[in-house]
Amino acid sequence: MNKDEASGNWKQLKGKFKEKWGKLTDDDLTVVEGKRDQLVGKIQERYGYGKEQAEKELGEWETHNNHRF
């Protein structure tokens, strides 16, 4: 996958993340830019979750969407 394809995929994923976690901002997702651990941290921050809860929700989302970071 080249850089343009990766960028396009990330743009699609950002929309899906915002559907699931509407409190995440565009800035949050720009900072995360494909880094799973940072996404978990942003979910924790915006929703007041512990790390385990954020990891669980993201894991379930990944399974449901056939996507893994």
Image (cartoon, helix red, strand yellow):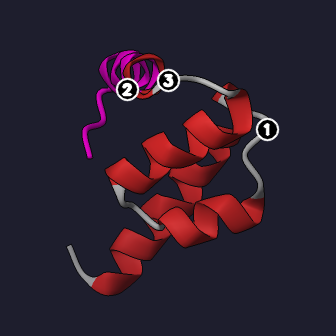
Tell me the residue that label 2 is attached to: 55
Contact check, label 1 and label 2, Cβ < 8 Å: no
Q: Secondary structure at mark 1?
A: loop
Name the amino acid, label 2: Glu
Name the amino acid, label 3: Gly
Contact check, label 3 and label 1, Cβ < 8 Å: no
Residue at 20%, 72% (x, y): give it.
Answer: 1
Tell me the residue that label 1 is attached to: 23
- Percent position of residue 55, x then y: 37, 26
Which residues are the magenta region?
A: 55-69
**Image position of 50 with respect to 45: above or below:** above
Name the amino acid, label 1: Lys
Residue at 64%, 41% (x, y): give it.
Answer: 45
Q: Residue furthest bottom?
A: 3
**Image position of 34 with respect to 61: above or below:** below
Which circle's residue, 3 or 1, is located before the other in the chain? 1
